[in-house]
Image (tube, rainbow, N blue to C red):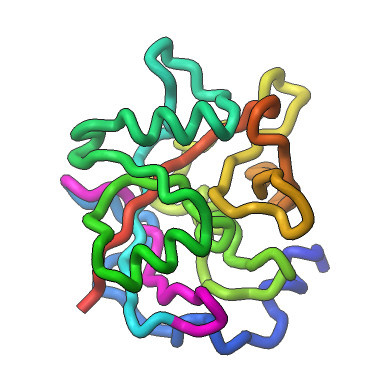
């Protein structure tokens, strides 16, 4: 059994949302919103937030003005901020996990595209604990997601990695997730070039 499958079958921590049947199917493309990725109840600042969100991913990867999609984290953060009415909404640099959780808890988040935290990419936190039943990696071949993620990195011999806005535990590098095998690692934000799939969050009823 793969390490990823073992992790997904591990005991559920308190921060994971309760299993619910959303009205939309994961991988369903919704006009004006993007591709539905699931319901998420964030866990931050040592507690679970009393709010749930529908997660929508963009139907394509982020690119700069030249069309380049392999970006450093700093470039990706800059490009997200530049987004205006991209697939129907603007972009925002949230700065990291803790800042995102505080923003969501404050009610001052207004549905902007963001670089997703690690948990929305792979479902786990930096300790490898399962915090979400879904993840863009797990859903990459489902419905409208199929065929929209990169098949390789800078060359066909390089695996495709995606940026998260989550800082690695021990240094100033950012967590990345390999969409070939689900490996979570970390990269230098100024030199490494990876893909980025923005998401946005809609308050759930």
In what quadrant of the picture does the N terminus appear?
Answer: bottom right
The residue at the point 25 percent across, 68 percent down is 107
Q: How far across and down, in percent of the image, does residue 40 sit?
A: 41, 71
The residue at the point 52 percent across, 81 percent down is 16
Q: Is residue 160 above or below residue 14?
A: above
Would residue 151 be seen by someone viewing this image from the given angle? no
* Residue 131 colored in magenta in the image: no
Q: Which residues are magenta?
A: 32-48
In what quadrant of the picture does the C terminus appear?
Answer: bottom left
Residue 205 falls left or right of residue 125: left
Would residue 189 be seen by someone viewing this image from the given angle? yes
The residue at the point 42 percent across, 20 percent down is 64
User: Closer to the camera, 204 or 126?
Assistant: 126
Residue 122, image quadrant: bottom right
Q: Is residue 160 above or below residue 58?
A: above
Residue 161 falls left or right of residue 1: left
Q: How far across and down, in percent of the image, does residue 45 sit?
A: 53, 76
Q: Is residue 3 above or below residue 115?
A: below
Q: Among all residues in the image, which is located at the extreme top?
A: 66
The residue at the point 32 percent across, 69 percent down is 53
Residue 164 falls left or right of residue 159: left
Decide whether the magenta segment is chiefly helix, strand or loop.
strand
């Amino acid at each position: 059994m793969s390490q990823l499958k073992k992790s997904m079958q591990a005991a559920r921590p308190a921060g994971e949302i309760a299993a619910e049947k959303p009205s939309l199917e994961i991988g369903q493309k919704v006009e004006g919103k993007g591709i539905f990725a699931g319901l998420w109840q964030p866990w931050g600042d040592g507690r679970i937030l009393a709010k749930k969100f529908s997660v929508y991913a963009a139907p394509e990867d982020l690119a700069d003005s030249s069309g380049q999609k392999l970006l450093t984290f700093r470039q990706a953060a800059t490009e997200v901020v530049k987004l205006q009415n991209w697939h129907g909404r603007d972009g925002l640099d949230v700065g990291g996990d803790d800042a995102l959780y505080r923003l969501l808890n404050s009610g001052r988040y207004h549905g902007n595209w963001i670089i997703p935290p690690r948990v929305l990419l792979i479902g786990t936190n930096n300790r490898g604990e399962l915090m979400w039943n879904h993840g863009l990696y797990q859903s990459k071949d489902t419905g409208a997601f199929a065929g929209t993620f990169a098949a390789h990195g800078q060359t066909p011999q390089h695996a495709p990695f995606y940026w998260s806005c989550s800082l690695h535990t021990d240094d100033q590098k950012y967590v990345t997730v390999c969409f070939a095998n689900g490996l979570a690692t970390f990269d230098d934000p100024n030199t490494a070039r990876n893909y980025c799939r923005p998401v946005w969050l809609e308050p759930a009823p």
